[in-house]
């Protein structure tokens, strides 16, 4: 981890700022001349060319015209979905060879580090929306392999809303802001989404996931990722094995609680992108394991569900994960637009040894991504942009088009040809060959009956959750449906929940204020089976007790003992966490030794929702001052209501009393200067038993 500046220093407070308040200094250095895009050196970039000092501006000011013209064209269409994202560079290293199953070098050469670029995103919100909206997160990885680019364009949830690509525009239109009014932004809590969902039983399983805490992750670094579809691996002999891809975060999974998510949206709308950026910046690169579920045709035909149905998963208890490598994200982009915005993922970007299945959703995606990039990036040459360009030779006879960057030489731009013996030729031995699946049948616009059971896995997911997680799903349905104005839609959706389980429907109905039985929605699926719970689907059942990669927020004020702050920070850093200090003034607070305690946040700009755990390092003087400060009371109140562990000096008690803190296992007094007990408690995560004492559980 990078070295931090010392937190405390004995600097007399009145020497913080120079007498004249001269806080800025221009950066020293030699600056190269500024030029136009044609390379001409610019003499004046602050004033346009005029006749006289106050006269009209001249059109011949080419530097002005070029600058404004370029600015006017700075934007490209945002992604129709997944518009808001953040990304980082890194590498993939294979640790366990799949050579037996796949001829892809990236999956068979152990130890080789393949460069990659990973982009995480929300789905529904526009580019400027908040990071902590309830939503699926995109989890897209572009591997620059020696055999061409492979894009694994997945999500942080292993299933999807729909089974057939033809329904995608409806799903997205229903989820995005309503077309007449242009709101609500970045949320499904409105009539059109739930209208669509209540009439689309195939979405039921996914609804359970997006109402769960998976849809409000604490950090991109603490999410799982999934390829979702069943893909094929093809080995040298041409044998096919089915595969599902999984990413597992080294830091463990963690989510925020809903009220916290709402408040983070105001406190720091860039919460996730800042978190990713900071982690890489301080030298704490996030890491995931890549794991696979491998299965053959025999399993596929005997499994209770259709492996081509993207609304179903294969429990890890049925087919365990095999970890085959790791992804490390260790470099932030140099430029958001050039890289994060212009990166173009396509499900069709595969390498020899990785192939598609007949999943109708995947097949539809295979058309969509290439098509959308042409609109978004303006033409067919987007693969030449540095972020999209393969790191292996690209040779073919595709020519010209908008923004062609290459200047291929010679007369021959076609194949076959005999005029030039050096032109490229296809190579059937090493080239990509589709798996020769035998297909026959009538042309039909139908849904396979093997895709029909929409409720058993929804039920599996719910009953695989721990109690707090089940409660959150119920509360999320209540929250979302409370925003739906059309009562018939609410009722229809509750009927759909009754298809999954009558008790869940009843709990949601109760939270919305409906009494009496909830009628099941009409369905063509008569049976719903009770499947064996899969604890691996729960976040909490497999949470890692660690403070690694987490953020400790330390509230200080005048009179705070700097030794306490330093001791907690050192212990936190030792446990792999980072600590930020929050003070009434961002310049810092005056410590009990007369020195300055450097702060990272001013109280109003550093609410406790931004931290995983908080410590109140306060003197009697500081406590007396902060009990009169609403932001300080809210800081403590929210931390308690968000079930966080709170460490505190004995003197901080009055502030905790004012904030309604009731002592429990998560309220830890710091004895002397030793923050270890507090941090060890914090490493265990939230205090779930506190939850029913701070909010209604339906
Ligand atoms: Fe996408 N999706 N999608 N999607 N998707 C796009 O491509 C689409 C689906 C996913 O960070 C678009 O470049 C269709 C499933 C991610 O740049 C678009 C269907 C999964 C990203 C598109 C799906 C995803 C996208 C918009 C149904 C998880 C962001 C801009 C058949 C397995 C990638 C773009 C990035 C982006 C179409 C369903 C993941 C329009 C038609 C299922 C992570 O092409």
Image: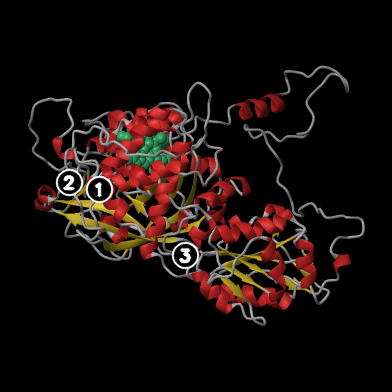
- Front-most of 618 and 125? 618
In front: label 3 or label 2: 3
Is 87 placed left or right of 205 in the picture?
right
How many C-alpha atoms fall within 10 Å of the one at disc 1: few (<14), some, or many (≥20)? many
Judge whether residue 686 can be spotted in this image.
no
For marks 3 and 1, give the one nearer the viewer: 3
Q: Is mark 3 within 8 Å of ligand 1?
A: no
Q: Residue 500: in sight, yes or no?
A: yes
Do the residues under discs 3 and 2 have CB atoms within 8 angstroms?
no
In the picture provided, is 59 more to the left or to the right than 535?
A: right
Dot 2: what SS? loop
Label 1: which residue? 457
Q: Where is residue 200 in the image (x, y as percent from the top left)?
A: 30, 32
Residue annotated with mark 2: 305
Judged left or right of residue 526, residue 205 is right
**C-alpha distance separating marks 3 and 1:** 28 Å
The image quadrant where one finds the N terminus is: bottom right
């Amino acid at each position: 981890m990078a070295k931090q500046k010392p937190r405390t220093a004995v600097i007399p407070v009145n020497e913080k700022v120079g007498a004249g308040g001269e806080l800025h200094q221009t950066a020293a250095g030699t600056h190269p001349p500024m030029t136009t895009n044609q390379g001409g050196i610019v003499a004046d970039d602050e004033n346009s060319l005029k006749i006289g000092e106050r006269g009209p501006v001249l059109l011949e000011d080419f530097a002005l015209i070029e600058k404004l013209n370029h600015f006017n064209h700075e934007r490209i269409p945002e992604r129709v979905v997944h518009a808001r994202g953040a990304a980082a560079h890194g590498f993939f290293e294979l640790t366990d060879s799949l050579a037996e199953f796949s001829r892809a070098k990236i999956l068979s050469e152990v130890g080789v580090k393949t460069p990659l670029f990973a982009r995480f995103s929300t789905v529904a919100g526009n580019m400027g929306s908040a990071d902590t909206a309830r939503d699926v997160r995109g989890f897209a990885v572009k591997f620059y392999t020696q055999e061409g680019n492979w894009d694994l364009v997945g999500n942080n949830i292993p299933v999807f809303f729909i089974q057939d690509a033809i329904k995608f525009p409806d799903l997205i239109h229903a989820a995005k802001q309503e077309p007449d009014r242009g709101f609500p932004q970045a949320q499904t809590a409105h009539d059109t989404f739930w209208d669509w969902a209540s009439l689309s039983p195939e979405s039921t399983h996914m609804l359970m996931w997006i109402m769960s805490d998976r849809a409000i992750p604490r950090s991109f670094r603490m999410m799982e990722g999934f390829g979702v579809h069943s893909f094929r691996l093809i080995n040298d002999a041409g044998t096919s094995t089915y595969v599902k891809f999984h990413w597992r975060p080294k830091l463990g999974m963690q989510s925020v609680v809903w009220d916290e998510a709402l408040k983070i949206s105001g406190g720091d709308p860039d919460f996730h992108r800042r978190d990713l950026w900071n982690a890489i910046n301080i030298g704490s690169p996030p890491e995931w394991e890549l794991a696979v579920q491998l299965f053959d045709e025999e399993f596929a035909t005997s499994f209770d569900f259709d492996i081509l149905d993207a609304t179903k998963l294969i429990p890890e208890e049925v087919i365990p994960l095999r970890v085959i490598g790791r992804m490390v994200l260790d470099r932030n982009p140099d430029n958001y637009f050039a890289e994060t915005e212009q990166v173009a993922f396509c499900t069709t970007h595969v390498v020899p040894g990785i192939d598609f299945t007949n999943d109708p959703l995947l097949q539809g995606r295979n058309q969509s991504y290439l098509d959308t990039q042409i609109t978004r990036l303006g033409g067919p040459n987007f693969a030449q942009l540095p972020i999209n360009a393969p790191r292996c030779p690209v040779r073919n006879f595709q020519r010209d088009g908008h923004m062609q960057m290459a200047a291929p030489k010679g007369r021959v731009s076609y194949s076959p040809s005999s005029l030039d013996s050096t032109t490229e030729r296809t190579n059937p031995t090493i080239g990509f060959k589709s798996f020769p699946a035998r297909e026959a049948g009538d042309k039909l616009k139908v849904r396979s009956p093997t895709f029909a059971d929409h409720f058993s896995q929804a039920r599996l997911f719910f009953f695989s959750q721990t109690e707090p997680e089940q409660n959150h799903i119920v509360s999320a349905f209540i929250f979302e449906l409370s925003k739906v104005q059309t009562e018939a839609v609410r009722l229809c959706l509750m009927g759909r929940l009754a298809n999954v389980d009558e008790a869940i429907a009843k709990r949601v109905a109760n939270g919305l204020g409906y009494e009496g039985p909830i009628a099941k929605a009409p369905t063509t699926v008569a049976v719903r089976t009770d499947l064996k719970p899969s604890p691996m689907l729960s976040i909490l059942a497999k949470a890692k007790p660690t403070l690694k990669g987490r953020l400790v927020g330390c509230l200080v004020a005048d009179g705070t003992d700097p030794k306490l702050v330093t001791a907690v920070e050192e212990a936190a850093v030792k446990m792999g966490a980072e600590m930020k200090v929050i003070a009434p003034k961002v310049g810092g607070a005056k410590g009990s030794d007369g020195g300055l305690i450097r702060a990272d946040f001013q109280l109003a700009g550093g609410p406790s929702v931004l931290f995983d755990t908080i410590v109140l390092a306060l003197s009697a003087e500081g406590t007396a001052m902060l009990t009169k400060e609403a932001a300080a009371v809210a800081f403590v109140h929210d931390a308690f209501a968000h079930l966080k562990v709170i460490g505190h000096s004995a003197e901080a008690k009055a502030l905790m009393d004012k904030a309604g803190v009731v002592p429990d296992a998560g309220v830890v007094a710091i004895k002397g200067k030793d923050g270890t007990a507090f941090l060890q408690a914090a490493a265990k995560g939230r205090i779930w038993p506190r939850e029913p004492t701070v909010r209604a559980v339906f």
